[in-house]
Amino acid sequence: MTTLKELAALLNISVSTVSKALNDSHEISENTRIRVKELATKLNYKPNRIAQQLKTNKTKIIGVILPTVTNPFFAEVLHGIEKTATNNDYDIIVCLSNETLHKEKRSLDLLANGSVDGFIIAVARESQVKEQTDHIKSAIKSKLPVLMFDRVVDDIECNKVIVDDFQCVYEATEHLIVKEKRKNILLVSNIEELSVGQLRISGYTKALEDHKLKPNILKLDNAVDLDVEKKIYTYLKGNNSIDAILSIDHVTGIVAINMAKKLGKEIPKDLSVVGFGYEHTQLLSSPKISIIHQKAHKIGEMSTKLLIDNIKDETLKMQTIVVPSELKISESSQTSF
Amino acid sequence: MTTLKELAALLNISVSTVSKALNDSHEISENTRIRVKELATKLNYKPNRIAQQLKTNKTKIIGVILPTVTNPFFAEVLHGIEKTATNNDYDIIVCLSNETLHKEKRSLDLLANGSVDGFIIAVARESQVKEQTDHIKSAIKSKLPVLMFDRVVDDIECNKVIVDDFQCVYEATEHLIVKEKRKNILLVSNIEELSVGQLRISGYTKALEDHKLKPNILKLDNAVDLDVEKKIYTYLKGNNSIDAILSIDHVTGIVAINMAKKLGKEIPKDLSVVGFGYEHTQLLSSPKISIIHQKAHKIGEMSTKLLIDNIKDETLKMQTIVVPSELKISESSQTSF
DNA sequence: TTGTATGCGTTATCAT
DNA sequence: ATGATAACGCATACAA
């Protein structure tokens, strides 16, 4: 790697002159500036970023700590983060907590030693359940800006970007009741231990309450593979009056459609199905599932924007931004082929 | 952030003594070592990694350049990379090329200035199609180890981890012919312009040739949403003799199942369906689709292992590792509920 | 307009 | 056993 020192030696001038020339300082003559730049491009000189970081005490790197990236929600958020970071000349270091407290803590501690200018975090399931968040507070205490999204911790004061979990489920439920005239709406859940799961369930029960209906909740207890199908199938078979299903994750809604068809139900005539979904979710079901579409990409964008603002001006006051979800009603009945 | 200098000042000893004490140098007395360490933990001292990086000329960071992360394959690879990197005390900087050449080049150039110790890359679609890979060669020339996976460039000499695209599709096709007695197998493709797409198609045509059957290929031309459904539906409707479908991506197989059911076909009696799939793919279809399961996580693990070996010993000779895929035959007929 | 000197935080070499 | 000094590559305050 070419260094300033090498350039200076070859040109018989001082290191600082070379530095200034490359940075377009006005105090350097046209002549030498050109000579320096020519040699620099010829030798493919690039300033050593590590040295710049040490000098300026800024890394232009954001630490991103996610529970997982195989969940499409977080993958899409990451996409938004990366794009916005790049547009603002930041790189991102990505760590995955795998939903564990110790990994989250380890990553945070490791990066808090000058490796990054700030953090974007969605806390791990374990950290949230055990309410252990000292590691995050500690990062903030050492003047590192932190932004939390989706899964946030109430008693930590920092910028936050959250989803309207309560509200969007409330509205989806109300849609089923009012627009689609449904009376027996089943909520299917396997994330009731997460704060977002609880919020979604609250949105559902509140909507039912407001309309004098009684809630039905099928908790899957973290079931996997065929168990998911079996539990839903069995429940539907034994409860024939169910006329709508509201899934609060991105998988069980599609499973519910498949199981309902297996039971000979017509969709959406006999049964309306709403679930959470991402870009391709609707393509995977037939008839099309209605989905609550979280603006994951936008969440990533706004999080990054907010964090970078905070990095550049630490005096800015903290805020919590709610990114509304979009309810996409299926129109499968109209598909004419 | 606490520094060595601050510790030294507080203890009235020199910086170098503090440094040695913390690094368990034998030439430091038991007494002072303990005093130093006590104060260090008390003040939560952590060595500044940037300074260490400048000193040692090693960052312990791997640059990871992916086309996207919303594709489950790359998400799972990333998971494997992150895990293995962490286990070997490396961090990862993730850049997304978004399938474009210029973004890939930009990321590579930006990180090649001392920011990382090596690269893991799956080249962007555009780079592969246009056969522009000078930026990668340039990184290698400046002594930065590069590992390519999945989408590789033949005329670049570096470590590679690839999938058995030809072989696994050949075997899946043969399975359909020999075990399931299928005669009219339709290949559904929308990635024919990628090297992996071409390999998969070759595996299919070769298997048919070897068994004296004629190929049917439905190219979707990067169709999206309803168009995907429509093209598959129309084709199936107009070609009633098709008795098996082989999808070479992870979406169209499920769509094919849904469309076949819509046409009143029984699966797997009338039609066998095989597609590419990931962890949850089978859960999303009913009856269950058979899948070619790429060991994405393992690809990430092996890539990282190989790169780190290469970083630690540059004289190691390059190798290309093939990670075999697994054919998971659906057993939906046996599900008894 | 150019050059010298200093420091970022750490480690390593060489005194004491 | 401890300390002074230099060096990694860069940027900048200050001198010339």
Image (cartoon, coloured by chain):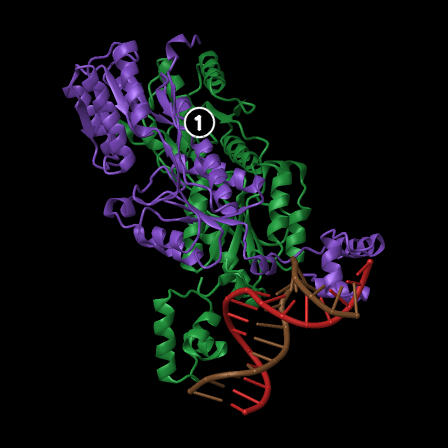
Chain colours: A purple, B green, C red, D brown
Residue shown at 51% from the left, 28% from the top: B212
Position above or below: B252 against B233: below
Figure quadrant of the C terminus of chain A: top left
Query: Percent x, y for residue A255?
Result: 29, 26
Q: Position of residue B99 (x, y in %)?
A: 58, 36
Q: Nearer the viewer, residue A287 or A246?
A: A246
Q: Amino acid at mark 1?
A: Glu
Q: Quadrant of residue A333?
A: top left
Helix, strand or loop at mark 1? loop
Q: Nearer the viewer, residue A322 or A27?
A: A27
Observer able to see residue B327: yes
Quadrant position of the N terminus of chain A in the picture? bottom right
Q: Is residue A28 left or right of residue C14?
A: right
Measuring from the top left, give residue B35's x and y in whole percent: 36, 78
Q: Residue furthest right?
A: A31
The image quadrant of residue A199 is top left
